[in-house]
Image: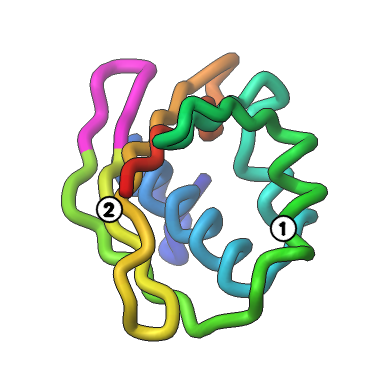
Amino acid sequence: MTAASGAPLSDLDEVLTLDDLWNAAYHLRDPQRMAGVLADDWMAFFPDGTVVFKADLLEGMMRNDPSALVFERHASRVYGDAAITRGTLYADGQRVQSFFRVFARRAGVWQAVSVQVVP
């Protein structure tokens, strides 16, 4: 990825861009946007022990209740070819969940590989 100036983005900027694309895809309930963010082997882990895979998430996105979503990012960090973001999701002004997202750079391309969701 490159910045508007044509300069390459830092690894952190690339990851934050992906994180923002993830949030926008949820806000718009757009599985096509989300598909470009998630690696094919992406997995999610939910508080009840449920594991969700990419195809399941993309299929289920259209059934999400329409609501005003706000994503609050608390932390982000790059560790070589791995990176994390941590934040909280609010729907219609109510706190819904916190999350810990994991990104990996594979063959020079950053993608989301996992998320842990907590109440």
Amino acid marked by disc 2: Gly
**Residue 112 position (above or below residue 71):** above
Residue at 72% x, 58% y: name it.
61
**Residue 77 position (above or below residue 68):** above
x, y percent for residue 46? 46, 35
Q: Which residue is mark 1?
A: 61
x, y percent for residue 26? 59, 63
Q: Residue furthest front?
A: 48
Can residue 10 be seen? no
Using the image as rendered, state which of residue 91 and residue 23 is in the foreground: 91
Please tell me whether residue 82 belongs to the stretch shown in magenta. yes
Question: Within 10 angstroms of label 1, few (less than 14), some, or many (20 or more) residues?
Answer: some
Dot 1 or dot 2: first in sequence order is 1
**Residue 104 position (above or below residue 111):** above
**Residue 87 image label:** 2
Amino acid marked by disc 1: Met
Over which residues does the magenta segment extend?
77-84
Using the image as rendered, state which of residue 97 and residue 55 is in the foreground: 97
**Residue 65 sits in which quadrant?**
bottom right
Question: Within 10 angstroms of label 2, few (less than 14), some, or many (20 or more) residues?
Answer: some
Please tell me whether residue 87 belongs to the stretch shown in magenta. no
Using the image as rendered, state which of residue 50 and residue 12 is in the foreground: 50
